[in-house]
Amino acid sequence: MERTGARYADRPTVEADTWIDAPPERVWTFVSDVELMPSMSAELQSVRWLDGASGPALGARFVGRNSNEFAGEWETTSHIVEFDPPRVFAWAVEDPERPFADWRFTLRPQDGGTRLHQWMRLGPGRSNLAVLIERMPDREQQIVRIRMRQLQESIIATLAHIKRLAEAPDRARPPGPVPNPLDRRRPGREAPVVASHAGEVCGVPPLGSGSPRCRSIRPWRPC
């Protein structure tokens, strides 16, 4: 697990990888299944394709509907910017030229299975995270640090979910979503081994004791 950057302008990144006991072609079916993403996230509620698309392809667009107790509900449009089965799958959130965030999966054969790597980078687009930082410039590093911990946790949960699906003995998807350690609001959820997620709560809760200041801010859309 690696993280870089202390300020939004640094375009901070976070990444992790895992080995999966399944061939890349098998892992790819889960990595590229955009409509499977909500089952891997505590925040992403649904995904729908745009422009008549029914599956992933270079240039295809999809809308993600998100929800959390701090930001309310919002949608973002993502553009698939790299699509090379079964090796690379990447998308940019909002404007591909100045995205709110970039996300990428890479796969390569290793030891009879697959080494799956996930990477993401914030900015440089003026997302609502950037707007929040503009309102609280003295807390920028704290906001970015917490946000990146959340993103780290999200990636860990996603990789574990894909590994479980790809290694399922019956080669079928287990029914229902895999418990997501990122959502501490839902009963029965346990804290993750590594503390954080793409929780896109974006550092709002821990900015102070109870952080009443952040709770009162007008809802913003995380990446």
Image (cartoon, grey):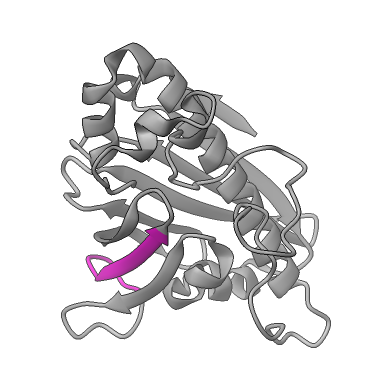
Q: Nearer the viewer, residue 49 or 75?
A: 75
In the rendered view, does 95 fall on the left or right side of 56?
left
Position in image of residue 217 (x %, y %): 28, 37
Q: Residue at x 53, y 66 (%)?
A: 31
In the rendered view, does 44 fall on the left or right side of 165?
left
* Residue 149 painted magenta: no
Residues rendered magenta in the picture: 56-67
In the rendered view, does 143 fall on the left or right side of 49?
right
Q: Residue furthest right?
A: 169
Residue 6 appearing in the image: no
Number of marks: 0
Q: Is residue 37 above or below residue 180?
A: below
Q: Residue at x 16, y 80 (%)?
A: 51
Q: Residue at x 42, y 17 (%)?
A: 141
Q: Nearer the viewer, residue 73 or 95?
A: 73
Q: Is residue 199 above or below residue 123?
A: below
Residue 172 appearing in the image: yes
Position in image of residue 38 (x %, y %): 49, 70
Position in image of residue 140 (x %, y %): 36, 19
Q: Nearer the viewer, residue 143 or 155?
A: 143
Q: Is residue 69 above or below residue 8?
A: below
Based on the displayed image, in which of its 4 quarters is residue 216 positioned?
A: top left
